[in-house]
Image: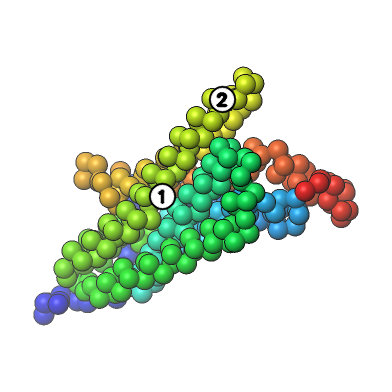
Amino acid sequence: MCENNQTVVTEFFVLGFKNIHSIRILVFSFFMLTYIVILIGNVLIIVLVTTCHHLHSPMYVFLKNLAYADILFTTNIMPNMLYVILMEGDYLSHVGCLIQYYVFCGSTYAQSLILSAMAFDRYLAICHPLRYATIMDYKLCRHLLSWPWVIGFLLILIEMVSLFQLRFCGSSFIEHYFCDFIPILENASSDTSAVKTEDLLFSFLLVFVPFVFVVLSYFFIFISILKINSMSGRWKAFSTCSAHLATLFIFYGTQITIYMFPVGGNSYSENMLKSLLYTVFTPFINPILYSMRNTEIRKATQFLFSRKGKQTYPFKA
Protein backbone atom coordinates (compact mmCIF):
# COMPACT_ATOMS: atom_id res chain seq x y z
CA MET A 1 0.00 0.00 0.00
CA CYS A 2 1.09 3.56 -0.66
CA GLU A 3 1.86 5.71 2.38
CA ASN A 4 -0.05 8.94 3.01
CA ASN A 5 2.68 11.16 1.57
CA GLN A 6 3.16 9.06 -1.57
CA THR A 7 1.31 9.49 -4.85
CA VAL A 8 -0.08 6.46 -6.71
CA VAL A 9 1.71 6.23 -10.07
CA THR A 10 -0.65 6.28 -13.05
CA GLU A 11 2.01 6.80 -15.73
CA PHE A 12 5.71 6.16 -16.20
CA PHE A 13 8.36 8.33 -17.81
CA VAL A 14 10.47 6.21 -20.18
CA LEU A 15 13.99 7.68 -20.07
CA GLY A 16 15.41 5.89 -23.11
CA PHE A 17 19.10 6.38 -23.93
CA LYS A 18 21.08 8.70 -21.70
CA ASN A 19 23.66 11.29 -22.79
CA ILE A 20 22.89 11.19 -26.52
CA HIS A 21 21.50 14.73 -26.90
CA SER A 22 24.17 15.82 -29.37
CA ILE A 23 23.74 12.72 -31.58
CA ARG A 24 20.10 11.86 -31.00
CA ILE A 25 19.13 12.71 -34.61
CA LEU A 26 21.82 10.36 -35.88
CA VAL A 27 20.73 7.60 -33.46
CA PHE A 28 17.08 8.18 -34.43
CA SER A 29 17.94 7.93 -38.15
CA PHE A 30 19.92 4.72 -37.62
CA PHE A 31 17.13 2.95 -35.75
CA MET A 32 14.47 4.30 -38.12
CA LEU A 33 16.36 2.85 -41.09
CA THR A 34 16.86 -0.42 -39.22
CA TYR A 35 13.15 -0.67 -38.44
CA ILE A 36 12.23 -0.01 -42.08
CA VAL A 37 14.63 -2.75 -43.23
CA ILE A 38 13.16 -5.17 -40.67
CA LEU A 39 9.63 -4.48 -41.93
CA ILE A 40 10.56 -4.75 -45.61
CA GLY A 41 12.56 -7.95 -45.13
CA ASN A 42 9.91 -9.74 -43.09
CA VAL A 43 6.95 -8.54 -45.17
CA LEU A 44 8.79 -9.77 -48.29
CA ILE A 45 9.17 -13.22 -46.72
CA ILE A 46 5.46 -13.34 -45.84
CA VAL A 47 4.46 -12.31 -49.39
CA LEU A 48 6.81 -14.80 -51.04
CA VAL A 49 5.80 -17.78 -48.91
CA THR A 50 2.11 -16.90 -49.27
CA THR A 51 2.10 -16.43 -53.05
CA CYS A 52 4.72 -18.95 -54.24
CA HIS A 53 3.29 -22.46 -54.08
CA HIS A 54 6.68 -24.15 -54.19
CA LEU A 55 7.53 -22.41 -50.88
CA HIS A 56 4.61 -24.04 -49.04
CA SER A 57 6.87 -26.61 -47.39
CA PRO A 58 7.23 -26.70 -43.56
CA MET A 59 10.63 -24.96 -43.57
CA TYR A 60 9.31 -21.86 -45.36
CA VAL A 61 6.02 -21.82 -43.45
CA PHE A 62 8.05 -21.74 -40.21
CA LEU A 63 10.04 -18.82 -41.68
CA LYS A 64 6.78 -17.04 -42.42
CA ASN A 65 5.67 -17.41 -38.79
CA LEU A 66 9.08 -16.21 -37.61
CA ALA A 67 8.59 -13.14 -39.81
CA TYR A 68 5.18 -12.50 -38.19
CA ALA A 69 6.81 -12.77 -34.75
CA ASP A 70 9.64 -10.39 -35.72
CA ILE A 71 7.19 -7.79 -37.04
CA LEU A 72 5.01 -7.96 -33.93
CA PHE A 73 8.04 -7.99 -31.65
CA THR A 74 9.73 -4.92 -33.18
CA THR A 75 6.55 -2.94 -33.88
CA ASN A 76 5.60 -3.26 -30.22
CA ILE A 77 8.89 -1.60 -29.19
CA MET A 78 10.63 0.37 -31.93
CA PRO A 79 8.06 3.07 -32.89
CA ASN A 80 7.80 4.19 -29.27
CA MET A 81 11.57 3.82 -28.87
CA LEU A 82 12.09 6.16 -31.83
CA TYR A 83 9.76 8.73 -30.25
CA VAL A 84 11.60 8.41 -26.92
CA ILE A 85 14.94 9.01 -28.68
CA LEU A 86 13.63 12.04 -30.57
CA MET A 87 11.87 13.63 -27.58
CA GLU A 88 14.50 12.47 -25.05
CA GLY A 89 11.87 10.61 -23.04
CA ASP A 90 8.14 10.02 -23.10
CA TYR A 91 5.24 9.38 -20.72
CA LEU A 92 3.47 6.04 -20.91
CA SER A 93 0.40 5.15 -18.89
CA HIS A 94 0.58 2.39 -16.28
CA VAL A 95 -1.79 0.20 -18.30
CA GLY A 96 -0.04 1.01 -21.58
CA CYS A 97 3.32 0.08 -20.08
CA LEU A 98 2.06 -3.30 -18.88
CA ILE A 99 0.34 -3.99 -22.21
CA GLN A 100 3.63 -3.29 -24.01
CA TYR A 101 5.34 -5.74 -21.67
CA TYR A 102 2.60 -8.34 -22.32
CA VAL A 103 3.01 -8.14 -26.11
CA PHE A 104 6.79 -8.18 -25.68
CA CYS A 105 6.72 -11.36 -23.59
CA GLY A 106 4.08 -13.10 -25.70
CA SER A 107 5.92 -12.47 -28.97
CA THR A 108 9.28 -13.34 -27.38
CA TYR A 109 8.03 -16.68 -26.07
CA ALA A 110 6.30 -17.41 -29.39
CA GLN A 111 9.51 -16.62 -31.28
CA SER A 112 11.53 -18.81 -28.92
CA LEU A 113 9.22 -21.79 -29.55
CA ILE A 114 9.09 -21.14 -33.31
CA LEU A 115 12.91 -21.17 -33.45
CA SER A 116 12.97 -24.49 -31.60
CA ALA A 117 10.37 -25.88 -34.05
CA MET A 118 12.55 -24.71 -36.96
CA ALA A 119 15.57 -26.44 -35.41
CA PHE A 120 13.54 -29.65 -35.06
CA ASP A 121 12.43 -29.37 -38.69
CA ARG A 122 16.04 -28.96 -39.87
CA TYR A 123 17.13 -31.85 -37.65
CA LEU A 124 14.56 -34.16 -39.26
CA ALA A 125 15.36 -32.96 -42.80
CA ILE A 126 19.14 -33.42 -42.41
CA CYS A 127 19.45 -36.32 -39.98
CA HIS A 128 16.42 -38.36 -41.04
CA PRO A 129 15.66 -37.35 -44.67
CA LEU A 130 13.89 -40.62 -45.56
CA ARG A 131 11.48 -40.32 -42.64
CA TYR A 132 11.02 -36.55 -42.88
CA ALA A 133 7.83 -36.56 -44.98
CA THR A 134 6.08 -39.10 -42.75
CA ILE A 135 7.06 -37.41 -39.45
CA MET A 136 6.63 -33.77 -40.47
CA ASP A 137 3.10 -34.26 -41.80
CA TYR A 138 0.34 -31.66 -41.99
CA LYS A 139 -0.98 -32.37 -38.46
CA LEU A 140 2.41 -32.02 -36.74
CA CYS A 141 3.29 -28.94 -38.77
CA ARG A 142 -0.03 -27.31 -37.84
CA HIS A 143 0.58 -27.97 -34.13
CA LEU A 144 4.15 -26.66 -34.30
CA LEU A 145 2.84 -23.47 -35.93
CA SER A 146 -0.12 -22.80 -33.65
CA TRP A 147 1.08 -23.84 -30.18
CA PRO A 148 3.95 -21.33 -29.92
CA TRP A 149 1.45 -18.47 -30.25
CA VAL A 150 -1.11 -20.04 -27.91
CA ILE A 151 1.44 -20.94 -25.23
CA GLY A 152 3.33 -17.65 -25.49
CA PHE A 153 0.33 -15.36 -25.12
CA LEU A 154 -1.71 -17.47 -22.68
CA LEU A 155 0.92 -18.40 -20.11
CA ILE A 156 2.15 -14.83 -19.74
CA LEU A 157 -1.38 -13.86 -18.64
CA ILE A 158 -0.62 -15.52 -15.28
CA GLU A 159 2.32 -13.17 -14.77
CA MET A 160 0.31 -10.19 -15.99
CA VAL A 161 -2.33 -10.78 -13.29
CA SER A 162 0.43 -10.52 -10.67
CA LEU A 163 1.88 -7.39 -12.30
CA PHE A 164 -1.49 -5.62 -12.33
CA GLN A 165 -1.84 -6.32 -8.62
CA LEU A 166 1.41 -4.52 -7.79
CA ARG A 167 1.27 -1.03 -6.30
CA PHE A 168 3.42 1.74 -7.76
CA CYS A 169 4.10 4.73 -5.53
CA GLY A 170 6.55 7.63 -5.71
CA SER A 171 9.12 6.68 -8.38
CA SER A 172 7.82 6.64 -11.95
CA PHE A 173 10.95 6.45 -14.11
CA ILE A 174 11.61 3.56 -16.50
CA GLU A 175 15.37 3.43 -17.06
CA HIS A 176 15.03 1.71 -20.40
CA TYR A 177 13.74 2.38 -23.91
CA PHE A 178 10.67 0.18 -23.33
CA CYS A 179 8.70 -1.27 -20.43
CA ASP A 180 10.83 -4.27 -19.53
CA PHE A 181 10.43 -6.56 -16.52
CA ILE A 182 13.28 -5.31 -14.30
CA PRO A 183 12.62 -1.55 -14.79
CA ILE A 184 8.93 -2.09 -13.99
CA LEU A 185 9.69 -3.97 -10.76
CA GLU A 186 12.17 -1.28 -9.68
CA ASN A 187 9.19 1.10 -9.42
CA ALA A 188 6.96 -1.30 -7.47
CA SER A 189 6.18 -0.50 -3.83
CA SER A 190 4.63 -3.87 -2.97
CA ASP A 191 6.16 -7.35 -2.65
CA THR A 192 7.48 -8.62 -6.01
CA SER A 193 8.71 -12.08 -4.95
CA ALA A 194 5.73 -13.93 -6.48
CA VAL A 195 5.98 -12.26 -9.89
CA LYS A 196 9.76 -12.76 -9.92
CA THR A 197 9.25 -16.49 -9.32
CA GLU A 198 6.66 -16.68 -12.10
CA ASP A 199 8.93 -14.84 -14.53
CA LEU A 200 11.86 -17.12 -13.69
CA LEU A 201 9.68 -20.21 -14.21
CA PHE A 202 8.34 -19.01 -17.56
CA SER A 203 11.81 -17.96 -18.71
CA PHE A 204 13.10 -21.42 -17.84
CA LEU A 205 10.27 -23.26 -19.62
CA LEU A 206 9.92 -21.02 -22.68
CA VAL A 207 13.46 -19.70 -23.21
CA PHE A 208 16.05 -21.91 -21.51
CA VAL A 209 14.47 -25.30 -22.36
CA PRO A 210 13.96 -24.38 -26.06
CA PHE A 211 17.54 -23.08 -26.13
CA VAL A 212 18.87 -26.44 -24.88
CA PHE A 213 16.66 -28.22 -27.43
CA VAL A 214 18.01 -26.01 -30.26
CA VAL A 215 21.64 -26.64 -29.22
CA LEU A 216 21.07 -30.43 -29.13
CA SER A 217 19.35 -30.33 -32.54
CA TYR A 218 22.24 -28.46 -34.13
CA PHE A 219 24.73 -30.77 -32.42
CA PHE A 220 23.22 -33.76 -34.24
CA ILE A 221 22.97 -31.68 -37.43
CA PHE A 222 26.71 -30.91 -37.27
CA ILE A 223 27.44 -34.62 -36.81
CA SER A 224 25.43 -35.37 -39.96
CA ILE A 225 27.22 -32.62 -41.85
CA LEU A 226 30.59 -34.19 -41.03
CA LYS A 227 29.41 -37.33 -42.88
CA ILE A 228 28.94 -35.43 -46.16
CA ASN A 229 31.52 -36.66 -48.67
CA SER A 230 31.82 -33.44 -50.67
CA MET A 231 34.10 -30.92 -48.99
CA SER A 232 32.34 -27.98 -50.67
CA GLY A 233 28.91 -29.28 -49.66
CA ARG A 234 30.11 -29.90 -46.12
CA TRP A 235 31.54 -26.38 -45.85
CA LYS A 236 28.39 -24.75 -47.28
CA ALA A 237 26.13 -26.60 -44.85
CA PHE A 238 28.48 -25.91 -41.94
CA SER A 239 28.71 -22.16 -42.66
CA THR A 240 24.92 -21.83 -42.98
CA CYS A 241 24.20 -23.74 -39.77
CA SER A 242 26.97 -21.89 -37.90
CA ALA A 243 25.44 -18.52 -38.87
CA HIS A 244 22.02 -19.71 -37.70
CA LEU A 245 23.44 -20.97 -34.41
CA ALA A 246 25.33 -17.71 -33.80
CA THR A 247 22.14 -15.63 -34.02
CA LEU A 248 20.31 -18.17 -31.87
CA PHE A 249 22.98 -17.83 -29.19
CA ILE A 250 22.54 -14.05 -29.28
CA PHE A 251 18.73 -14.27 -29.06
CA TYR A 252 18.60 -16.86 -26.29
CA GLY A 253 21.85 -15.95 -24.53
CA THR A 254 21.05 -12.29 -23.94
CA GLN A 255 17.62 -13.11 -22.52
CA ILE A 256 18.99 -15.85 -20.26
CA THR A 257 21.66 -13.52 -18.84
CA ILE A 258 19.12 -10.73 -18.27
CA TYR A 259 16.15 -12.62 -16.88
CA MET A 260 17.55 -15.86 -15.44
CA PHE A 261 21.25 -15.57 -14.62
CA PRO A 262 22.17 -11.87 -14.46
CA VAL A 263 25.91 -11.31 -14.80
CA GLY A 264 27.54 -8.57 -12.71
CA GLY A 265 24.21 -7.22 -11.50
CA ASN A 266 23.12 -6.19 -15.01
CA SER A 267 23.76 -2.45 -14.86
CA TYR A 268 21.65 0.05 -16.81
CA SER A 269 24.08 0.25 -19.74
CA GLU A 270 24.64 -3.53 -19.83
CA ASN A 271 20.90 -4.22 -19.93
CA MET A 272 20.40 -1.66 -22.68
CA LEU A 273 23.13 -3.18 -24.84
CA LYS A 274 21.92 -6.75 -24.31
CA SER A 275 18.33 -5.74 -25.02
CA LEU A 276 19.34 -4.09 -28.29
CA LEU A 277 20.90 -7.36 -29.40
CA TYR A 278 17.66 -9.33 -29.24
CA THR A 279 15.10 -6.55 -29.85
CA VAL A 280 16.84 -4.94 -32.85
CA PHE A 281 19.81 -6.96 -34.09
CA THR A 282 18.25 -10.43 -34.32
CA PRO A 283 15.02 -9.26 -36.07
CA PHE A 284 17.26 -7.33 -38.48
CA ILE A 285 19.55 -10.27 -39.24
CA ASN A 286 16.92 -13.07 -39.29
CA PRO A 287 15.55 -12.34 -42.80
CA ILE A 288 19.11 -12.22 -44.15
CA LEU A 289 20.39 -15.43 -42.55
CA TYR A 290 17.29 -17.58 -42.83
CA SER A 291 15.91 -16.36 -46.13
CA MET A 292 18.01 -14.11 -48.33
CA ARG A 293 20.89 -16.62 -48.29
CA ASN A 294 18.41 -19.30 -49.43
CA THR A 295 18.54 -20.05 -53.16
CA GLU A 296 14.80 -20.60 -53.57
CA ILE A 297 13.95 -17.40 -51.71
CA ARG A 298 16.36 -15.42 -53.89
CA LYS A 299 14.88 -16.91 -57.06
CA ALA A 300 11.36 -16.15 -55.87
CA THR A 301 12.38 -12.57 -55.01
CA GLN A 302 13.99 -12.01 -58.40
CA PHE A 303 10.94 -13.36 -60.19
CA LEU A 304 8.54 -11.28 -58.07
CA PHE A 305 10.27 -8.05 -59.13
CA SER A 306 10.94 -9.08 -62.72
CA ARG A 307 8.78 -8.23 -65.70
CA LYS A 308 7.42 -11.78 -65.61
CA GLY A 309 5.89 -11.19 -62.19
CA LYS A 310 2.36 -11.40 -63.55
CA GLN A 311 2.97 -14.79 -65.14
CA THR A 312 2.62 -18.17 -63.49
CA TYR A 313 5.48 -18.97 -61.15
CA PRO A 314 7.95 -21.13 -63.15
CA PHE A 315 9.53 -23.22 -60.38
CA LYS A 316 8.33 -26.70 -59.68
CA ALA A 317 7.13 -27.73 -56.26
Mark 2 nearby-residue class (10 Å; few <14, some 14–19, many ≥20): few
Give the residue displayed 60% in from the left and 52% down from the top: 136
Tag 1 secondary structure: helix
Mark 1 nearby-residue class (10 Å; few <14, some 14–19, many ≥20): many
Label 1 sits on residue: 210
Label 2 sits on residue: 227
As rendered, which of 270 and 119 lies closer to the eye? Answer: 119
- In the rendered view, does 39 fall on the left or right side of 271? right
Q: As displayed, is residue 98 above or below residue 133?
A: below
Residue most toward the top? 231
As rendered, which of 163 and 317 lies closer to the eye? Answer: 317
How far across and how far down the image is residue 180, in percent? 34, 59
As rendered, which of 136 and 79 lies closer to the eye? Answer: 136
- In the rendered view, does 252 fall on the left or right side of 195? right
Give the residue displayed 64% in from the left and 37% down from the top: 293
Give the residue displayed 88% in from the left and 49% down from the top: 308
Tag 2 secondary structure: loop
The total of numbered circles placed on residues is 2
- Real-space Cα distance between discs 1 and 2? 26 Å
Q: Quadrant of the N terminus?
A: bottom left
Q: Upstream in the sequence, badge 1 or badge 2?
A: 1
Q: As displayed, is residue 83 above or below residue 234?
A: below
How far across and how far down the image is residue 133, in percent? 64, 49
Residue 131: name its quadrant: top right
- In the rendered view, does 225 fall on the left or right side of 189? right
Q: Are marks 1 and 2 in contact (CB under 8 Å)?
A: no
Q: Residue type at mark 2?
A: Lys
